[in-house]
Amino acid sequence: MTTEVKDLPRGRAFTRADLATMPDDGHRYEIIDGSLIVSPAPRIRHQIVVTALIPRLRDVCPPDARVLTVPVDVVLADDTVMQPDILVALRTDFTESDLPGPPLLAIEVLSPSTRGIDLLLKKERLQRAGCPHYWVIDPDEPSIIAFTMRDGVFELCGQAAGTETFAATEPLSIAFTPDELID
């Protein structure tokens, strides 16, 4: 096995082209407004939530939309390529390699290493891109907070913790308790 040294851009923002040079090493590489975000592989608890939520979303997903999980590039600009943990988008919006534009719904499951990025950077950048819905799930509580776009700004539209029922009608009609996502 050889060690490979990458030349990182100096004096300029990271771009989508730079992502293609990142190693396939189990880390998630994203760029937000030109800044490189590197995340380690998620914890098992994180993956339990993702795998519990995917079939629930697919069961209520309309036929013209698709539910996918990471890794799927969401390209918001040449300097912003994200990979939400789960996304829902219209089938016609995908290319063969990515989603060029915001999804209908982006869902992040918090990890200790990504909490600030998910609650601040990603939320703000998805808001600027016009993503209609953004949900954040905390597997440690467990809880969910949901935001919807109103007049260009994310507003809190729902939340639940533990055995409380979270219900949404947009972009999907779904109800569950955060406890149900943890086995």
Image (cartoon, helix red, strand yellow):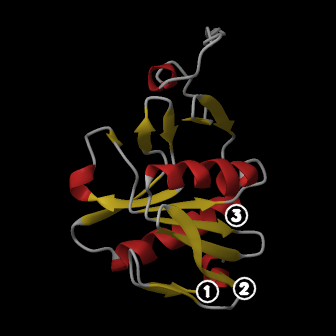
Is there any visible trace of residue 42 in the rendered image?
A: no
User: To which residue does mark 3 refer?
Assistant: 45
**Disc 2 residue crowd, few under 14, some 14–19, many 20+, Cα 10 Å:** some
Q: Are marks 3 and 2 in contact (CB under 8 Å)?
A: no
Q: At 76% from the left edge and 47% from the top edge, which residue is drawn?
A: 113
Disc 3 is placed on an element classified as: helix
**Quadrant of the image occupied by residue 37:** top right
Alpha carbon of mark 3 to alpha carbon of mark 2: how far? 15 Å
Q: At 70% from the left edge and 63% from the top edge, which residue is drawn?
A: 45
Q: At 66% from the left edge and 91% from the top edge, which residue is drawn?
A: 164
User: To which residue does mark 1 refer?
Assistant: 177
Q: Nearer the viewer, residue 56 or 88?
A: 88
Q: Are marks 3 and 1 in contact (CB under 8 Å)?
A: no
Residue type, numbered disc 1: Thr
The percent coordinates of residue 118 (x first, y second) are 65, 53
**Disc 1 residue crowd, few under 14, some 14–19, many 20+, Cα 10 Å:** some
User: To which residue does mark 2 refer?
Assistant: 162
Alpha carbon of mark 3 to alpha carbon of mark 1: how far? 16 Å
Q: Nearer the viewer, residue 183 or 146?
A: 146
Q: Is residue 59 left or right of residue 31?
A: left
Alpha carbon of mark 1 to alpha carbon of mark 2: how far? 7 Å
Looking at the image, is 116 positioned above or below residue 19? below
Q: Is residue 133 left or right of residue 115?
A: left
N-terminal of the pair, mark 3 or mark 2, is 3
Looking at the image, is 89 positioned above or below residue 34? below
Q: Quadrant of the N terminus?
A: top right
